[in-house]
Image (cartoon, rainbow, N blue to C red):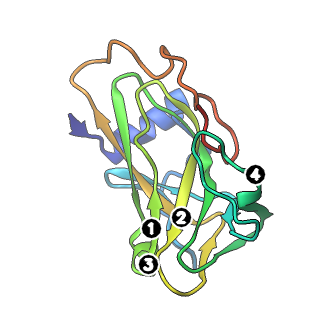
Amino acid sequence: MSIQSDRWIRERAIEDGMIEPFVEAQRRDACISYGLSSYGYDARVADEFKIFTNVDNAIVDPKDFAQNSFVDRKTDVCIIPPNSFALARTVEYFRVPRDVLVICLGKSTYARCGIIVNVTPLEPGWEGHVTLEFSNTTPLPAKVYANEGACQFLFLKGNEPCEVSYADRAGKYMGQRGVTLPRL
């Protein structure tokens, strides 16, 4: 596997719609940077958030997800309570080629504030908005800014296309739009 360059990412985004909308260069104008970088793409977080709360003493269960365990907010700035987390999604819609695996890492600006971004790998053939988890590891409330950079995606090209892609398996998160909760 080899990591793909800005040239390859740009070509796939423009010719194949791999990333939509696509920002061809890093944008930094008084915001947390986003757009194409040397060997990756810095995606933005959309303005839709599911902020976890324990007002109703809900239990987080991936097999039976309680709707009362979070509050929905559409906002430019999401405040995550101390030692809690929020779900969000990318502004960008991704279409992963059959011979590529995508890994996501959090932005250092957030990491230096104790805010961790978690995303599982984007498998070959998967497409959709990426659901992001922001964990506030601090004892203080933390801010996440919508429409600004949240994480960086790295594109690893395999030596050949996989035999069975995420699309072939009809994966449960295929084509997701919006913030997507756990599914069985």
As helix, strand or loop, the secondary structure at mark 3 comes to loop
Q: Quadrant of the N terminus?
A: top left
Q: Nearer the viewer, mark 4 or mark 3?
A: 4
Visible residue check, residue 8 = yes
Tags 1 and 4 touching, CB below 8 Å? no
Query: Callout 4: few (<14), some (14-19), or many (20+) C-alpha neighbours within 10 Å?
Result: few
Which residue is pictured at 37% across the width and 51% down the height? 40
Q: Which mark is first along the chain, 3 or 2?
A: 3
Residue occupied by mark 3: 114
Q: Residue 67 carries which label?
A: 4
For the residues labelled 1 and 4, the Cα–Cα distance comes to: 23 Å
Q: Which mark is residue 127?
A: none
Q: Looking at the picture, which amino acid does disc 2 mark? A: Phe
In the image, 68 versus 139, the foreground residue is 68
User: x and y percent of residue 127 in the render?
Assistant: 55, 31
Tags 3 and 1 touching, CB below 8 Å? yes
Quarter-of-image position of residue 60: bottom right
User: x and y percent of residue 36 in the render?
Assistant: 44, 53
Q: Which mark is first along the chain, 3 or 4?
A: 4
Q: Looking at the picture, which amino acid does disc 1 mark? A: Ile
Tags 2 and 1 touching, CB below 8 Å? yes
Quarter-of-image position of residue 49: bottom right
Q: Nearer the viewer, mark 1 or mark 4?
A: 4
For the residues labelled 3 and 1, the Cα–Cα distance comes to: 6 Å
In the image, 182 versus 131, the foreground residue is 182
Query: Callout 1: few (<14), some (14-19), or many (20+) C-alpha neighbours within 10 Å?
Result: many
Q: In which quarter of the image is the C terminus?
A: top right
For the residues labelled 4 and 3, the Cα–Cα distance comes to: 27 Å
Residue occupied by mark 2: 134
Q: In this view, does 111 lie above or below 140?
A: above
Residue occupied by mark 1: 116
Tell how many labels: 4
